[in-house]
Amino acid sequence: MLKKTFAGLLVAGTAWGLFSFTSGTNERYFDIAKNLDIFATLFKEVNTYYVDDVAPSKLVRTGIDAMLKSLDPYTNYIPEDDIEDFRTMTTGQYGGIGALVGKREGRTIISLPHEGSPAQKAGLIIGDEILKIDGVDLSKKNDNEVSKLLKGQAGTVVKLEIKRFGQDKPMMIDVTRANIQINNVPYYGMVTSDIGYLQLSGFTVDAGREVRSAVAKLKEQGAKKIILDLRDNPGGLLNEAVNISNLFLPRGKDIVSTKSKVTDWNKMYKALDEPLDVQVPLAVLTSSNSASAAEIVAGALQDYDRAVLIGERTFGKGLVQMTRPLSYNSQLKVTTAKYYIPSGRCIQAIDYAHRAADGSLHKTPDSLRVAFKTANGRVVYDGGGISPDLEVKDQSVPDIIRKLVSKNYIFDYATRFRAANPTIGAAKDFRLSDAEYQKFVAYLNGKDISYSTDVEKALDNMVAKAKEDKHYEEVKADIEQIRKKVATNKSNDLVRFKAEITELLEQEIVSRYYLQKGLVESTFNDDKNILAAVEVLNNPDKYQTLLTVSAKK
């Protein structure tokens, strides 16, 4: 212990000498050195005198995480043990079985094998429960521990003990790990005879190449208009955002600029290559979870009036991160700049440098957002994400559906359906019959589908307030009458929301047969954003109007 403490003091002393030598009387570096010394001596005292044993690494990690958290959510310390996961996030590559696996009410369940993956080739299907990995019982393992057991060097074999619905005994399945490449474009296909659709889920290495290939193949299939789906895309590599924007914008156009405290790092990123197509009508779908690189693409295409944006205002992440190497093979991911799209606006929604007195953060109010103009003179705004040209609000999720999803009733029923039905029709055409829906309702008999509605919660608050003000007896009868009406309405929710529940059941069932591609195609007839995009792309006058008339703020 004393040796570790001495080493910490030595590091602090070295830092003091370094800062003093290189910066002279610079008060800022003196302040840094002083606080490093304070930290080292404080750590020594805690380590020596705290009543219980202290785990040095855990304590320092807590301090590091808390310090970085005070800056912004994107500045993170990455220890050596987490480097592989970080590399997977940036490259989309890892050694494993190629399946989404997670805990569902304490069970480790395969929720989606990737097409062509070792998991699929070995015969694993959605709904399979993994009991053991190489003999290790998973009943008390968390998702991260399960992930580490499944990952490994390509070519090695992992032995899985699987429990499958409809089979009495568990079975052993050997899966040979491979180098898995997570596709940035998990799906592309034709929505109509002349409208192509592609889903872009990330911006790892080669995202631009994947989008180029997908668009080219869609055009070969007859696509004369394109829907680019960026919904829920969290972003990724900045250069890939530039590459994808460049596919639809002329060479030489400004795409995004970065401005940093280190002025040498300020840079303008331009479209450097010949575009793929600068004429094809383009609709871009966005959601409140479209962030970072996804916002660069959406914003650049909007600023040049190159595409109609449809959906929701994006997340509002206008910050750029880079990684810096640290000692012991660890790294720091640190926010180094803000980015600005072609109109000159920064779409960062939260100013992390200015917190309220209580430490809270707030988004820029609409009244303080600054106006900019697109190439066609349309007014657009900074300070809070990219606003769509045509807003399609996400529907609120009924309480009954939240309950059915959280209890895995829809997921588990789809697993039962797959066991009883070896095949179904094409993903785009599959529809759940009324008779089958009634089977689902019967399946729910005896299961916990109780929940509190917003109205019931409001009534509870009203009762508490009425009792506090001593008026409860006067309103008790009225409140109880409302409760009875709400209870009656809840009992009919499986009928009232039949269409919405059926839609989710159809998607879940289709995924059992056609995996990710089928899951996407099953939404074509119900997805309001896709339907709105098809309507706009099929109406040239409306398409041009949206690109010349400013959308509402």
Image: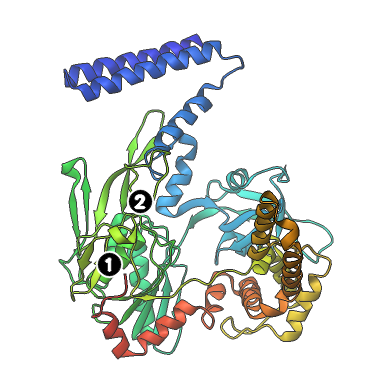
- Is 157 in front, or is 316? 316
Image-quadrant location for residue 406: bottom right
Q: Amino acid at mark 1?
A: Ser
Q: In the image, residue 404 lies at what x, y percent? A: 69, 66
Q: What residue is pinned by disc 2?
A: 350
Q: Are marks 2 and 1 in contact (CB under 8 Å)?
A: no
In the displayed structure image, the side of residue 159 where residue 196 appears, left or right: left
In the displayed structure image, the side of residue 209 where residue 171 appears, left or right: right
Q: In the image, residue 414 lies at what x, y percent? A: 70, 71
Q: Amino acid at mark 2?
A: Ile
Q: Of the numbered discs in the image, which one, if any, rests on residue 245? A: 1
Q: Of the numbered discs in the image, which one, if any, rests on residue 19? A: none
Image-quadrant location for residue 135: top right
Can residue 163 be spotted in the picture? no
State the separation of the CA atoms marked 2 and 1.
25 Å
- Is 239 in front, or is 359? 359
Q: Quadrant of the C terminus?
A: bottom left
In the displayed structure image, the side of residue 277 where residue 202 appears, left or right: right
Count neighbours of disc 1 (C-alpha within 10 A) and say few if under 14, some if 14 to 19, many if 20 or more.
many
Image-quadrant location for residue 391: bottom left
Q: In the image, residue 528 lies at what x, y percent? A: 49, 79
Looking at the image, is mark 2 or mark 1 earlier in the sequence?
1
Q: In the image, residue 116 lies at what x, y percent? A: 55, 66
Residue at horizontal 55%, vertical 69%? 396
- Local secondary structure at mark 1: helix
Can residue 358 be spotted in the picture? yes
Residue at horizontal 32%, vertical 78%? 282
Decide: is 190 above or below 19: below
Decide: is 90 above or below 544: above
Count neighbours of disc 2 (C-alpha within 10 A) and say few if under 14, some if 14 to 19, many if 20 or more.
some
- Local secondary structure at mark 2: loop
